[in-house]
Each structure stands twice: as C-alpha cells, then as structure tokens.
Image (cartoon, grey):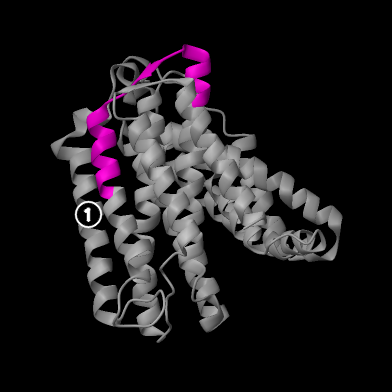
Amino acid sequence: MKIKFLYKWTTTLPLLASLLYVSGVIHNSPVWQILACLLLVGSVLSAVHHSEIIAHRVGEPYGTIILAISITIIEVAVIISLMISGGNEASSLARDTVYAACMLILNGIVGLCLFIGGYKYHEQVFSPQSVTIALVSLISIIVFTLILPSFTKSVSGPYYNPSQLLFASFSCLVIYTAFIFAQTIRHREYFISKTTQSSEIPKTAVSKKAFFTSFIFLVISLSVVVLLAKTLSPRIEEIILDYHLPKALVGIIIATIILLPEGIAAVNAARSNRLQTSLNLALGSALASIGLTIPVVSVIAHYYKMKIELGLDYLSMILLMLSVLTVMLSLNSGRSNIVYGTVLLINLIAFGYLIVYP
C-alpha cells in the first residue's frame, strides 16, 4: 500500500518565496523583509520534508548524500557569484564560509544531536567504523585546505601558489571520492545501523511521482533559501553594525540559514533514535563543504586570475582542531551520551563569543 504524502504547504511556501524573491519588493519595506524571513523558514522546513521522502525512496546512506551535495552545490554557486562580483576584496570568502560551516556542523549539528539523543535515550549506538572513515578524510582535507597555506613559503601570506593549489584541490577530490566509494559501495554496511534498518520505511511506500516531485521541490526550496539569505544579508549586516558587532557575524548567520535543512533533518533523526543517520548527514556535509567547494572555487579563481586566501589565523586553527579532536574522542566508542553533546555545544558558544570578543 502506498503512503500518501501531502504536498500543500511543502510546495506552496517555496513557490511563494520564489515569487517574492523574483518580484524584487523585499527591499521596499520592512514588512516584506519580515514576510521573506517567514517564507525562508517555511522553505527550510519544506526542504527537510522533501529530503526525508527522497531518503525513504533511495535508502540510506544515499538520502543523506543527496541532501548534503545539493546544499553544497548551491553554497558553491553563492560563493562563486559573490567572488566574481566582489573581486579581490572577496579573496577570503571561500575560506570564511567553509570554516564557519565546519564549526557549525561539527559543534552545532553534531553537538545538538548528541545532546538531544543522550537526553531522550540516555545512550545511543552507531558504527564507529563509519565515523573513523569520515573523520580521517575530514582531518586530511582540513589540513590541506585551511592549515598548510599559512605555513608554506613559496608565497607570502596564507596563500598557495598555483601548483600547490592544484595539488590541494586534486587531493580533496580524491579523498572525497574515496569516502563516497566507501560509504555507498565498499563499506556501505558501516553507515547503516540496526536502528536505521528497523525504522526505515520501505522504498515501495514512496511512489516514483512522489520521489520526483520531492526532488524538484528540494532543489527549489534549497535555492530559494540561499537566494533569500543572500538578499536579506545587507539588512542583517546593517543591524549587526548598528549594534557595533563584528561583520564576520554576517557570514555565520548566512551559513546557519543555509545549514538549517541539514541541521533539522539530523536532529529529527537523532530524536527518532537514528543517530547513525544524523552522523552520516553531519560529517558527510562537512566533507562535501570543503572537499567540493575548494576545488571548484580554485578553478574559478584561476580563470578570473584571483587570489584565494585559504590559511586560517592561529586562533581559528586552535578552535577548529579543538572541534575535530572533541568530535573524534566523542565518537570513538560507538556509543554517545549527553556529556559529549554538552562539550561540543560549549565549543560552539566559544566560537561565537571569540568572534565578538577576539
């Protein structure tokens, strides 16, 4: 028997948000801006709904991969458009966006999933092999893209020379491809837990029509979320500057909005005692955010003869490595509890605090 999925608000809200964006009236009045914020939130919830339907149809871990890569592609498109329009002044945009996304995913999404799962179920289980594969890949990509550029000597400053940038981009693609191969083919069983299998809706419960409809509206929802976030960013920046806060908070707020669909989907999975799905989504998103973004941005920068500032400062390096180390130690046993989530959320608060008070 087919499960009937309702396409009312989950299709109406993204379409209304798209019409509002195309109309261009968002800049005319605060009322339109408030409406845009409400439709943005509705589009985020719509994206989560459609991603869950797709996940039921294709099965895990393919569903989480589709959502992670979809958001990453749109994120890359926004970065490229801003880099081209901003020129050399946007040389650090890719680095700042990727860094913020990693901190939000590792500390915010993973931390919240562990905290909520630990609070509700006392202890949750997952595959430590899957986490190890993801973290080994993530650490290598982070070092190649965000750490080493600050220490190489061929170019002054946190930059790679063209050959080094090519090597780093190639390394990212190879590592990410190897991760996807392990996740979907060679070691797929590591990324599927018993709780995921027992709670999974049969593929036949989702019709082909429902699957294709959800796929289309997932793309529409994610696109309008990014476009509205980009449109509202000047107003957000104005509010932040009015309160004499660092401009870097704008990027964090925009990254938070973009990551909301992944975050909500991951938290919902943790609440349903499917922590493995949450970790697949969170760690896979972190890998896609760096492993796909940096190579594409590198090609665009080379074409437009732009310099890319990749290396982090020492404070950011310490915070990033603290986050990776905490996640690694928290997930090495295959069992979670509320303490791990608490520590990661404190790391996230420290990240935000040190942005405001560096």
Look at the image and tell me whether residue 48 can be seen: no
- Residue 157, above or below 51: below
Q: Position of residue 94 (x, y in %)?
A: 46, 66
Residue in the image at 44% along x and 74% along y: 309
- Residue 29, above or below 196: below
Q: Residues within 10 Å of mark 1 (few under 14, many from 20)?
A: some
| Horizontal arrangement in the rendering, residue 252 relative to residue 321 (left or right) | right
Amino acid marked by disc 1: Ile
- Magenta residues (range): 115-137
In the picture, the quarter occupied by the N terminus is: top left
Query: Looking at this rendering, what residue extends furthest in the left direction?
Result: 186
| Horizontal arrangement in the rendering, residue 261 relative to residue 274 (left or right) | right
Q: Position of residue 330 (x, y in %)?
A: 37, 30
Look at the image and tell me whether residue 272 can be seen: yes
- Residue 314, above or below 51: below
Residue carrying label 1? 175
Residue in the image at 81% along x and 58% along y: 243
Principal SS element in the magenta part?
Answer: helix
- Taking the magenta stretch, the answer to whether it contains residue 256 is no
Q: Position of residue 3 (x, y in %)?
A: 45, 21
- Taking the magenta stretch, the answer to whether it contains residue 135 is yes
Residue in the image at 26% along x and 31% along y: 191
| Horizontal arrangement in the rendering, residue 11 relative to residue 233 (left or right) | left
Residue in the image at 41% along x and 69% along y: 310
Q: Nearer the viewer, residue 86 or 92?
A: 92
- Residue 43, above or below 6: below
Q: Position of residue 231 (x, y in %)?
A: 68, 63
